[in-house]
Amino acid sequence: MEEVDRQIKEKRITHQDAQSEAVFNKIRDDLWYKTFSSQEKSYESLYRFPSETIVGHIHTIGSHANGVWELEKTSKENKELPAHKKQLIEGCLIFHQYLVSRGLEPRLIIPDNYSKLFSVVANDSKDARDAVKEFQQALTAPLSNQMEIWDNASTDLRQLGQLILHDGSQENVDEIKDRLTECNDAIQCVNKEYGLKLSDHTIPLEYLVILSEERSQNQISEEVVVSAFKELMATFENVMGKAYAAKVFPNMTPEYTERTWATIENLKKDMGVEETEDMSDRGEEQEDPPATDEAPPPPATDEAPPPPATDDAPSATATADPLFEPSGNLDFLDFDLNPPDYGPAPTYENGITEHGKVVAIRMSSASARNSRFIINRGTAKTPIYKVCKGNVFWPGGAEKLEEDETYHVRFDSIARKRKVRGEVNTAVVTGCVEMPIMNPAPPGKRARRPDLYFRVVYHSDLDRNPNAKSLPLVEWLTRTELIQLVGKKKAEEEEQKYLPHHRKQVAVFQQYFLAGYHPDTRKPLTAQDRQEYPWLFNGVNYAFNINLDDIS
């Protein structure tokens, strides 16, 4: 985490402090409690998400949840309160679908304090719990990186279960235990990378080790081991999903009893899994619910139930968020949480997409959805370039765009160099675009550099560019291709010159995008602008502090 490294360098904390989970969490929370406009780079580094529409949704949902909470504290008998809650829930579900459709994980994007506040607002009726079940499950589900490690560990977990059940070789048990320990170390590396607590979704290895030791010492019978495995399977169903539990414990059916729920709660704590308040209807986690004739009882717990919230003593989970302190008015209720009607799906004619206008395509041999599309998401006067894969478009969109071969980049370094005739100014670099890496490197692997594409403009004068009539005058080249064209030293100079400007330009344009301002006129977008640049209207109408001089 960059912020931790910075504080160590500034001697604000020591290396020993940096290993503390409490210190790490405090630094992470402090970042969230600063305004986004001054902490955009920290957010992107910590949570790894594109800030455009997503951040606008977070701000909107967070402020609305706080507003509904304030309204509920003022008067729980307010007849309009259920409608406002329903509107909030619908907005959250739309946001969840938006994230999932883009392969993003809500747990890494939605701050914990908003998740808890949303849970308080949405869970006071069964209808609300049913409506937001999928959204809430996404807030506690394992990350894709965590799930990948669990999948790799499934065979060892299954074999360890067989060894414990049949009192197998202790040497084999120790070998598997060592491999599972390595899996937990890998999960902790992922958790640290994402700013999660280290125990989040770790394998409950200690529980299995205790079972193994007691079984090898004949302290428990085979029947007791089977019962313990059924409880562990029930836990895996709730945390990792029914399919995963069945893979680890084939031919076994979990039993949901009062004792089982107590064990599940204890195991979840060992696995670092927390639920938002009153989130789960027992037995209906992650995937298909286990078959039971009656509703399972609530889990046993040693903790006393929390006292009912009163007007004088609001719940601890709804503490004020410094980012959105209640304003005392209800103007927020006039905002429609449903997204604007952007009309029908794009036709992708003439390179026009919902993200901007295509200027170049780097073809993939696999499929159009894996091709790289370089897009101008700004205007003709103020181009703001972005590169994305074809899977961001509607079904069939990438294939439609690839039909126009004028966008295809086919760099021919031999032809370019053969006819240069010693002229060093044949080509000029005019900009670049960076493709961010959305996922961290696997544990133990060094992170690779983001892909970079350079906009190269060739002279149209045949005396200076013999290829002016036969090859394109503008090409988007990779680092390697640019090195082939101009040499490594010159290519590195161009990267150092254009990449910082590109990053700054994108960050400022995102503020234009969210605030609904035109990058050319520096004024609010108009109906006429929608005809010429419809993609500029896909932001969220949320006001940021904008330095209008930074966009050029």
Image: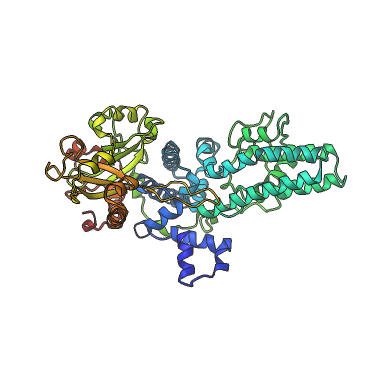
User: What is the x, y in percent for residue 359?
Assistant: 25, 38
Question: Is residue 36 or residue 222 the one in the foreground?
Answer: 222
Question: Is residue 252 or residue 120 the one in the foreground?
Answer: 252
Q: Is residue 279 visible?
A: no
Q: Is residue 94 left or right of residue 416?
A: right
Dividing the picture into quadrants, the one containing residue 239 is top right
Question: Is residue 484 or residue 452 the one in the foreground?
Answer: 484
Q: Is residue 157 left or right of residue 136?
A: right
User: What is the x, y in percent for residue 114?
Assistant: 47, 50
In the image, residue 18 sits, relative to residue 531, either above or below, namely: below
Q: Quadrant of the C terminus?
A: bottom left
Q: Residue at x 56, y 43 (%)?
A: 142
In the image, residue 448 sits, relative to residue 349, either above or below, namely: below
User: What is the x, y in percent for residue 485?
Assistant: 27, 47
Q: Is residue 440 visible?
A: yes
Dividing the picture into quadrants, the one containing residue 493 is bottom left
